[in-house]
């Protein structure tokens, strides 16, 4: 087996592992979102989105990006087999997780009335934000434990945590929604955060951590060093979360809470079914990229391998989703959510752009070039927000789908030029061939949206999906000897 095949196999295995988790979560999500839509309606879905958006904004700021830096530090030490350094990084991470968690909770409690006023136009939800402040502490601690699993490459444990967490989230939240209605949203969010913490702690405790003698002052100084890259990540995360918050508030004020519900529902569909690739990137790709970040040639190879694998897996999936979107929306929600169909379909046209952009974007983080990363995030964040506000005002929900396509297409161009200038980066002919081949099938699937006959639309869509799947399987077999990989998996 060649080194290239081995790398492709590692990417494919990680994607398959978290793809299985994602499929399970999709099944659970279908049941949950269907019941939530029926029990709470579009207004309830909108309230959930409006409560969550400012909380994510706060945690992105108060979290200081510690988890990203810790993944890099733990991953590098794990690659060298340096148990002492691993224990040192984990000890600092855990202490700072408590600090950032309490900081987020205190900030939320302090400005709860203002959050309610800014988000809903009144102070009726102030106590909701007060109660939800505890979720910021729980999320901070949970994120710290998950970071340990990620840095030490315990992907199976992360997968188990995700599967069990999804199931428990369903069984605890739905009864609350049924019993309390909209009033059950806050308790359900708290219980979900607590469940995630318990699971992440259970699996991360299996990681061996040596006793490390560190005073509070030493932990503070070492944590600041770890947060150096994290501070850049914090600012970037703040920009992204603040943009999401502004967009949700803008939609709420201009179109009403139901429009926010449609927007979040559309994103729910897109995120659920395309999260396989991005989940794998966040867990496996980043630590692997960090391990080779000093070698520009290896970085270039790994970026292209990740992007090519993502394109081949996503091509058939996107073609199928676009064709079946009306059915998917009906299954997940209710006929009242029909405005989501075109918005979600347009957004899916930009998902492959996002996969390529993300593959390139992780290079800055792996190399620890926080300043460059931040500059690009500020530029892209402002551009995306501008496109979103302008095109929503012009075209409504569909305008947001178009904005997504434009934003990530431009992100690819900018990232490529910056990487080429700073790290002698380039893309191979193989990459371009696979991109145009897979994206061609996605465009053909989108064109079926305009066919009036449902029978003809689904028939043509099915043919496109089959052709896309056969093409991807053929290409994957060439890259990683898929047949032998599957054969070995069944033998084991």
Image (spheres, helix red, strand yellow):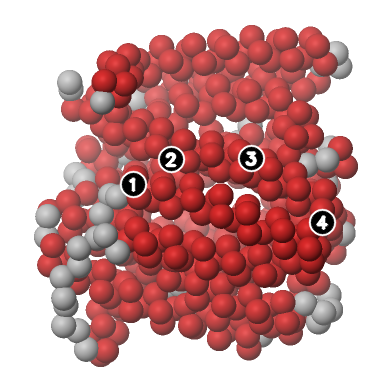
Give left or right: position of 227 versus 64.
left
Q: Which numbered disc, 3 or 1, marks the residue that appears first in the sequence?
A: 1
Q: Which mark is residue 270?
A: 3
**What residue is pinned by disc 4?**
40
**What residue is pinned by disc 1?**
155
Q: Residue at x 87, y 59 (%)?
A: 256
* Residue closer to the observer: 345 or 34: 34
Q: Residue at x 57, y 26 (%)?
A: 317
Q: Which numbered disc, 3 or 4, marks the residue that appears first in the sequence?
A: 4
Compared with 157, 346 (above or below) is above
Q: Image quadrant for the C terminus?
A: top left
* Residue 302 quadrant: top left
**What residue is pinned by disc 2?**
18
What separation in Å lies between label 1 and label 4 (alpha carbons)? 35 Å
What separation in Å lies between label 3 and label 2 (alpha carbons)? 16 Å
* Residue closer to the observer: 217 or 102: 102
Give left or right: position of 98 versus 351.
left
Q: Are marks 1 and 4 in contact (CB under 8 Å)?
A: no
């Amino acid at each position: 087996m060649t080194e290239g095949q081995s790398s492709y196999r590692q990417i494919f295995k990680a994607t398959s592992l978290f793809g299985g988790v994602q499929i399970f979560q999709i099944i659970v999500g279908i049941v949950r979102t269907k019941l939530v839509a029926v029990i709470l309606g579009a207004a309830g879905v909108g309230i959930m989105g409006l409560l969550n958006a400012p909380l994510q904004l706060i945690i992105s700021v108060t979290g200081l990006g510690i988890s990203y830096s810790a993944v890099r530090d733990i991953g590098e030490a794990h690659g060298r087999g340096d148990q002492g350094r691993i224990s040192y990084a984990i000890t600092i991470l855990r202490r700072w997780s408590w600090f950032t968690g309490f900081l987020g909770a205190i900030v939320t409690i302090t400005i709860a009335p203002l959050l309610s006023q800014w988000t809903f136009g009144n102070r009726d939800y102030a106590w909701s934000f007060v109660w939800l402040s505890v979720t910021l502490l729980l999320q901070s601690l949970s994120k710290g434990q998950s970071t340990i699993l990620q840095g030490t490459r315990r992907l199976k444990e992360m997968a188990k945590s995700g599967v069990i967490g999804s199931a428990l989230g369903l069984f605890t939240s739905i009864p609350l929604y049924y019993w309390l209605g909209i009033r059950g949203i806050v308790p359900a969010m708290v219980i979900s955060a607590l469940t995630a913490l318990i699971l992440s702690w259970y699996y991360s405790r299996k990681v061996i951590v040596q006793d490390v003698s560190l005073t509070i002052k030493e932990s503070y100084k070492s944590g600041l060093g770890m947060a150096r890259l994290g501070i850049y990540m914090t600012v970037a995360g703040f920009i992204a979360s603040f943009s999401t918050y502004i967009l949700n508030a803008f939609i709420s004020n201009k179109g009403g809470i139901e429009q926010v519900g449609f927007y979040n529902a559309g994103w729910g569909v897109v995120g659920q079914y395309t999260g396989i690739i991005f989940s794998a990137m966040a867990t496996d790709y980043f630590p692997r990229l960090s391990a080779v970040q000093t070698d520009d040639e290896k970085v270039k190879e790994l970026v292209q391998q990740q992007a090519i694998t993502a394109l081949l897996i996503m091509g058939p999936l996107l073609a199928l989703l676009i064709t079946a979107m009306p059915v998917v929306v009906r299954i997940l929600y209710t006929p009242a959510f029909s405005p989501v169909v075109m918005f979600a379909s347009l957004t899916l046209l930009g998902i492959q752009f996002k996969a390529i952009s993300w593959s390139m974007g992780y290079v800055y983080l792996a190399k620890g070039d926080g300043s460059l990363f931040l500059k690009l995030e500020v530029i892209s964040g402002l551009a995306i927000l501008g496109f979103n506000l302008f095109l929503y005002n012009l075209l409504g929900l569909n305008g947001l789908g178009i904005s997504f396509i434009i934003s990530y297409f431009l992100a690819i161009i900018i990232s490529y030029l910056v990487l080429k200038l700073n790290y002698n980066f380039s893309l191979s002919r193989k990459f371009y061939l696979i991109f145009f081949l897979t994206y061609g099938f996605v465009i053909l699937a989108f064109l079926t949206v305009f066919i009036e006959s449902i029978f003809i639309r689904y028939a043509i869509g099915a043919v496109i999906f089959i052709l896309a799947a056969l093409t991807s399987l053929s290409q994957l077999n060439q890259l990683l000897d898929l047949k032998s990989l599957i054969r070995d998996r069944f033998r084991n």
